[in-house]
Image (cartoon, grey):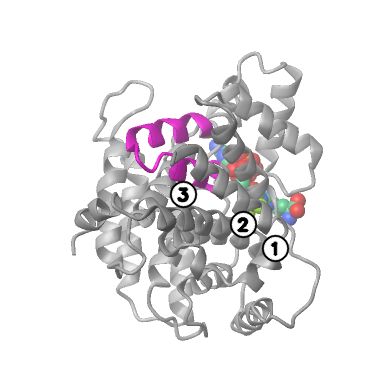
Amino acid sequence: MSVLKSVTMAARLEASVLKSKFKGCLLGALIGDCTGSPYEGDTITHGDKLIIQRYYDKLEDPSFTAPFKSYTDDTAMTKSVAKFLTDKPEPDYKFLARLFVNEYFKEPRRGYGEGVVEVFHKLKNSKFADIYKPASEQFLGAGSFGNGGAMRVAPIALYFYDNYKAMLEVATNATRLTHTHFLGVHGALLQAVAIDLALKFNQNVKINPERFCAELFRRIRKIERIDEDTDEIDERDYSRKAYQEKLKVVEYLLGKKHDDELDEEVILTLGNGISAYESVPTAIYCFLKSLQEIPSIQTDNIFRRTIQYAVTLGGDTDTIASMAGAIAGAYLGEEAVNPYLAKHCEFSKEIAEMAENLYAAKVKP
Ligand code: F2R
Ligand code: MG
Ligand code: MG
């Protein structure tokens, strides 16, 4: 079945299925963040992969008791984005900027990126006079290309599931409060588009990874061709094809046989870093690869496999696992989420409620 046909079918998803997918998506973002953060910044060896297998086995074991895994900036900011959508009838970006800043000053030790911390101080000190100015001054005016916009975009993809144009517009404006570099913005849009596409697949319909990737390519091509400042297309600017090139690599890697060396190739070519460019395509790859069995990962559950595989790549594990988990959860729904795994994560009950509120705010009975 073609991707477009599947997506059209999705418009007819039952209300209960859609609600389950909203919850699966935000739970995926949370579980990826909480369970991935202990490994953030690590290089993962073959032995570490065995330890990570046992780590997830334990987290899914009903008899395993341990303090919950804390969430980090990824979830702190996702919470604010969800509130921004549910608490006001129209997008109010000053309200969102205030939510980000309040959340940061309430709990600054959630592992925020250095750049965004500077933006939050400037926003507060300027009393939110011009909400887009601090971010535009970052990195000598280039703006941040970190993955902070992408890691928090899930609620926007869900809320605007029925309005693609609004989804892209709101995701852009919400990202630009902290990230104005086009790689940061386009990375957030690619993540939103991936969630949107996954959400619209019936969870009982098998996704063809190559076709999914081709549809993402078609959509990001349109996005990358538009220059936000001039609205003109500059075909000569190679960097404006950055995500198209990455998706070609995703497709190439999906065709390769799995072993530890392939993981090395994934890290070298797609990346596992803190920039959107080196993490969003990687998260998409983790999801698409996990649709099939991975010999080094023992689980039948695609949702868990996606998150576990993302963590075994090392680097920006909380964020890559969070983004990959959000895509997997949007496809599979809440039913795919092991309740014990969820219970081991701080804020799991609350994030599920937030997803329900988001659904209720959007889909009126
Ligand atoms: N910050 C972290 N992890 C670092 C370690 C945390 C530590 N364990 C702790 O507990 O404190 N993780 C979180 O940050 C990432 C999201 O970052 P975000 O929101 O994009 O922040 P920022 O500061 O805008 O960008 C991140 C860094 O990327 C580099 N960078 C960005 N744009 C740049 C540009 N135009 N030129 C040069 N460098 C640029 C800078 O080093 C930024 O600080 C997530 O991983 C989240 O989990
Ligand atoms: Mg984090
Ligand atoms: Mg991170």
Q: Which circle's residue, 3 or 1, is located before the other in the chain?
A: 3
- Image location (x, y in percent) of residue 150: 51, 45
> Could you tell me which secondary element the residue under label 2 belongs to?
helix
Between the residue at mark 3 and the residue at mark 1, the CA separation in whole angstroms equals: 28 Å
> Could you tell me which secondary element the residue under label 3 belongs to?
loop
**3 and 2 marks in contact (CB < 8 Å):** no
Q: Residue at x 52, y 85 (%)?
A: 298
- Image location (x, y in percent) of residue 140: 59, 27
Q: Which residue position holds label 1?
A: 345
- Residue sitting nearer the eye, 17 or 146: 17
Between the residue at mark 3 and the residue at mark 2, the CA separation in whole angstroms equals: 21 Å
- Residue sitting nearer the eye, 144 or 303: 303
In front of the other: label 3 or label 1?
1
Q: Which residue position holds label 3?
A: 277
Q: Is residue 290 above or below residue 212?
A: below
- Image location (x, y in percent) of residue 25: 50, 56
Residue range in magenta is: 149-174
Amino acid on which disc 2 is placed: Leu
Which label is found at residue 164? none
> Is residue 241 in the magenta section?
no
Q: Is residue 108 above or below residue 202?
A: above
In front of the other: label 3 or label 2?
2
**2 and 1 marks in contact (CB < 8 Å):** yes
Q: Which residue position holds label 2?
A: 30
Q: Residue at x 62, y 85 (%)?
A: 50
Task: Tell how many labels.
Answer: 3
Q: Which circle's residue, 2 or 1, is located before the other in the chain?
A: 2
Packing grade of label 2 (10 A; few <14, some 14-19, many >=20) is many
> Could you tell me which secondary element the residue under label 1 belongs to?
loop
Between the residue at mark 2 and the residue at mark 1, the CA separation in whole angstroms equals: 8 Å
Q: Residue at x 60, y 44 (%)?
A: 78
Residue 43 visible in the displayed image: no
